Structures are given as C-alpha cells and as structure tokens.
Image: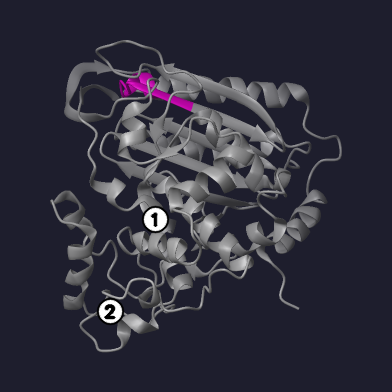
Amino acid sequence: MRLSFFAIFSLLSTLLSSAYAATGAPEEQQAQFLKSFNQHVKALLSERSIPGGAYAIIKDDQVVVVKTFGHLDMKSKKPVTPDTVFRLASVSKPFAATITTMLAHEKRLDLDAPITQYVPDFHLATPGAAEKIKVRHVLSHTTGLVPNAYDNLLHERWSMEKVIRRFEQVEPLCQPEKCYGYQNIAYGFLEPAIEQSQPQSYETLLEQRLFKPLGMDNASVGLKQFSQAENRAKPHVLINKKNTGKKDANGKAIKAYVWRTVKVTPDYYKVPTAAGINASITDLSKWLIANLGYSPEVLTPALIADMTEPRIRTRKDLKRRHWRTYLKDAHYGYGWRIYQLKDYPVVYHSGWVQGFRADIGYSPTLGVGFAVLINAESNAISEISAEFWSQAYKLTDEAPAKT
C-alpha cells in the first residue's frame, strides 16, 4: 500500500518524539522565540527600509500572533493593518491547484486529460508533444517546457490567445513528468480547464468553495478587485542602494535603501490561476489553518494529501540563499513546494510580482503555519521565512533533546 505524504510524516512525527526531551518545551522558550523573532523581523525590515508588511504565526487551529509593520504607501503614511490587502503573486498557485484537484476528486475534471482538451490552440514545435501534457503535469510543473516559458510576453500588450499560439515555436526540453520547469503562462491553462469542467467561473468557484467558507473576507481575484480595495498596500521598487559610511555592531557596512511607489501592473493578472489573487494576512491565517487540516468540510484530508504528495524533485531549491543551510531535500506537489528540513517537512510557496513579495508555509508534523507579506521587492522575505522555519520546532509541545 502506498502511503500518502501526510501519512508518512505523521509516522515520522511519532518517531521523532522519541528523540525529544520528555519535559517538553516550556512556555518561556516559546515566548522567547516569538519575542526574538519579532525583533529580528522588525530590525531586518527597518534595515532594508521596507515600506510595509505583515506576518502571522499559526499553531494548530489558532492564530498565535499577527504583526504588522509600516505603511500602505510611503507617501500617505496610512498604517498596514491585519486586513490590508496585498498581491499574493505565485502564492495564488496553491489556490488554483486546490480548486483543480477538488474538481478532480468530485469526478468533474480528469487530471489525466490532455491540457489541449481545454486549450485546443496550444501546440508545440514537436508534433504530438502538446497532446502528451496532462492537467496533472501543469499542476506539478512537469510539462517538459523550458522554465517560465514566455513570461516575458506577459509584459507586452499581447492577449493570452496570441501568447498561446506562440508556443508552436517551442521544442520541449523533456518528456512530461521527466523534468521540472516552473511555469506561469502554462499554469494559466488551469483556468479554462476549471471553467470547462463545470458551469462557474474560476473567480466564482474561489469565492464559493474557499474564500466564503473559510471566512477570507478580504480575498479577491484580479486587478479591478485589488484597485477597489480601500485598505490595500501600494507596490514599491528599489531605486537606490548606497553605502552610508557607517557600520553596525558586527562591522558590516550599513546601506541606505530607497524605494519608490509604482503603479500596479496588470501583467500577471492575465494568468489568475498563476498569480491573480489578492489577500490580507488575516486571510492567509485562515487559509493556513484549513491546510493544517482544521476545516475538513472545505479541504478534505484526501485532498490535502493528494496536493502535497511530492511529484518532482526540485534540486535548484536546495541552493536557495538563506534556505540552503537548512534544506535536506525539495520537491513540488500540486501547487505547493515540499521542503524537507532536518527533522520536519514544510509545505511552502513564495510569490513575487512588481512591488510585492509573499511567502507562506506550514508543517503538518509540527502543526505550525507561517505567512509573511511585504509591499516591496526585497529578498528580506526569504531570509525571514528561512529563519522562522529553522526554529519553528520551538512552538511545539516538545523541545529537541540536547546533543
């Protein structure tokens, strides 16, 4: 019998308990971790002059803490609140994968159907190659296409129909399922697959099947909805980074970061299943609790297990700055990355569009979730996430035994 990802790591969690101290993690340790982590985040965001951000920490079905920082816009000075809406960028992919896999479990959509069944104008230079790509290959980025195929055309005034026809010039790198290649436009193919399998739009399904049942009151899809949100973060890009001539306590040169507010670009909103969702940190807290298994009427255990089963190894992730010290292995499932740290897994995704960064993850073994949003293009967010997950065990009931 083949064990699911969650079954495997539930077993792993039990086995790991024998390596933990019997006394458990004192409340003081948890409180100290939360305090020191918050200080670390505040210092890092201040050092990089990040305009605004927010993070949330989840334990089981409870929100442990929500912290907000800075402002919606450097000019207006309106503060970020727990309900401030940010762009999620590629953190949208787990939502699209959830809806797609949900429809498959309901027998409305076949994950083994060729994607050309839903996108008939999609062809590749190699005859018959496009027809070999199935819906599940799109979900797991195992289409065999060159990574980020034609993402550059999202920045042009091209319709999706025109972009899709351009694929007839592309030779596949490998057979489907044989190599990993991250996609945005191809992930956009999930939208017609979803909408042709049943009568509702993708946006309506998200609202009815995920947002409303989970109480994600600030979540939406698309540029229009983002622009209509009164409490929304404005995007910022770095225009200058220069030495101040000063050094910190460790002798490291202190740099000044200068950000500029820019207009929201429509580029990645063209592929809503890849990068079209907007949400607040409060919304992501509820999303994490559901993915940790506490809303089984919305996300069934079978659905979560299917989505988080490792489908393809992503070796490049093992070299990610800030993460590489902690990662032992990395895979992609359906809409989620599965990172293996030394003693526990993290189901994770990041997102990046002009002026915004987003990170979200949870560990089924620890029962811990974490999300962070910022309205600036800074890799500080990756440093924050890696730092959190390297110490997340401190929020559990058991502390690692001393070695």
Q: Residues within 10 Å of mark 2 (few under 14, many from 20)?
A: some
Q: Position of residue 382 (x, y in %)?
A: 41, 40
Q: Vertically, is 258 above or below 14? A: above
Residue 338 appears anywhere in the view: no
Q: Quadrant of residue 15?
A: bottom right
Q: Nearer the viewer, residue 249 or 217?
A: 217
Q: Position of residue 21 (x, y in %)?
A: 81, 41
Q: Which residue is disc 2 drawn over?
A: 172
Q: Nearer the viewer, residue 309 or 324?
A: 309
Give the mark nearer the N terminus: 1 vs 2.
Answer: 2
| Outermost residue to the left | 157
Q: Position of residue 179 (x, y in %)?
A: 39, 75
Q: Nearer the viewer, residue 255 or 216?
A: 216
Q: Quadrant of residue 295?
A: top right
Q: Residues within 10 Å of mark 1 (few under 14, many from 20)?
A: few
Amino acid type at image mark 2: Pro
Report whether 228 appears left or right of 111: left
Q: Is label 1 or label 2 in front?
A: 2
Q: Vertically, is 223 above or below 5? A: above
Q: Which mark is residue 319?
A: 1
Residue drawn at (22%, 80%) of the image? 171
| Outermost residue to the front | 199
- Considering the numbered disc 1 on the image, is that residue within a helix, a strand or a loop? helix
Q: Position of residue 366 (x, y in %)?
A: 70, 44
Amino acid type at image mark 1: Lys
Is residue 46 within the magenta segment?
Answer: yes
**Which residues lie in the magenta part?**
45-54
C-alpha separation, residue under disc 1 versus residue under disc 2? 25 Å
Is residue 58 within the magenta segment?
Answer: no
